[in-house]
Image (spheres, helix red, strand yellow):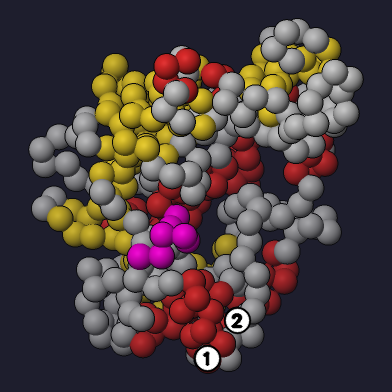
Amino acid sequence: MSPDPSCATEGTEDLILVGLSGGVDSAVAAHLLLAEGHRVEGVFMDNWDSDDPWCTAAEDLEDARRVAERLGITLHYASFADEYRTEVFADFLAGLRAGLTPNPDVACNRTIKFGLLHRYARRLGAVAVATGHYARRVEISGGPCLHRARDLEKDQTYFLHAVGNEALAMSLFPLAETSKSEVRRLARRLAFPNHAKKDSTGICFIGERPFAAFLSAHLPPEPGPIRDEKGRLLGEHRGVAFYTLGQRRGLGIGGQRGAAEAPWYVCAKDPATRTLLVTQDPHHPRLWSRTVEIDEIHRLGPFPEGFPESGLGAVARYRQPEVPCSLTFSGPTTAIVRTERPLYAPTPGQALVLYQGSRCLGGGRIVRAHPATGQELSDL
């Protein structure tokens, strides 16, 4: 287990700043760089200034401190809480109000972890920033590009597709060739105090918490009707902002008279009428699409021969199986993506990420997904 050999020169005295989150991945990333002979310091980012019981920042900071002590490295502390609220969280709420489902983790990586943190690192004199992300940086003609990690189950390139190219050039991913099971074993062997700490699955910096209750403190309730495809009223929701396409939990409409004992799925949202449309058909055309419009396209890495428009793969949700696709630009930062098979619930506001082989080419924000036709659904 060693850092990606394309990342840096072994044994350098140049400073590498490692983002220590308090988790096991970043701890092992720091160890691997030290084992390569690098000069390493850590930084803990505290970007959610809340004292509610769901916030684990204090516990995470203590874990990061204990790891730094174990490794014998300096730990810096940085708070970008104001920037997170104004540049990430405010946009997240605005998108929800508009009926979209934004991805704050993508925005956080672009703006905070691979934006403000990199500027902070340069002020400290660091030549690179390392994180515990599972991804690979590969050098090609013209500069670095991003590839999937060896551990495909943990690969995080979906969340990294929008980072700036300048930031990518300054980034190291020591876990590129390492599996999660290897990380756990090494952390245990090194007696890291957080070796058994479970992975975080909540929103970046906000953590794991009852999501609807959390949003209720930031968004006013805007209840409206829940209807099926025939317009039948099934119940009332708390606000379309609290739901996303494909959602099947937390609808509160089970046991409908005359309906099958089967799950209900959110298949459409209408913010104008505050209507939530649901179906019990998992193959409903509104849940699937082979034609997706995207904007805010970000091209990640160099493209000496221009951005490819064929032979691509599309992913509309984290860990969703990649679907072969082609792309047609409709403007400098807008395009239409056509997939060979229907994509499940491509959701406006979410990211559609493009791949060519193992390389992550970048991606864009989903603007509109065209419902699949009957013929297209026959491919399922």
**What is the chief secondary structure element of the magenta stretch?**
loop
Residue under circle 1? Answer: 190
Residue type, label 1: Leu
The residue tagged with tag 1: helix, strand or loop?
Answer: loop
Q: Where residue 168 appears, x then y in whole percent?
A: 32, 54
- The residue at 84%/27% (across/down) is 253
Helix, strand or loop for disc 2? loop
Lower sequence index among marks 1 and 2 = 1
Q: How many marks?
A: 2
From the viewer's perspective, tell me whether residue 162 is left or right of residue 92.
left
In the image, residue 159 above or below residue 19: above
x then y, percent, for residue 342: 43, 28
Q: In the image, what residue occupies the spot 32% across and 61% down?
A: 136
The amino acid type, in three-letter code, at marker 2 is His
Question: Gap in Å between the C-alphas at discs 1 and 2?
Answer: 9 Å
Segment colored magenta: 150-156
Q: Is residue 153 magenta?
A: yes
Give the left or right position of residue 72, taking residue 338 as reference: right
Closer to us: 13 or 152:
152
Q: Residue 74 in the image: x percent, y percent?
A: 51, 82
> Residue tagged by mark 2?
195
Residue 367's place in the image compared with 104, above or below, is above
What residue sits 75% from the left and 32% below the top?
262
Quadrant in the picture for residue 36: bottom left
Please give left or right for residue 311 compared with residue 58 in the image: left
**Depth check: 272 or 118 in front?**
272
Label 1 with label 2: CB-CB less than 8 Å: yes
Residue 124 x %, y %: 41, 69
Residue shown at 39%/30% (left/top)?
A: 341
Q: Judge whether residue 105 can be spotted in this image.
A: yes
| The stretch drawn in magenta includes residue 219 | no
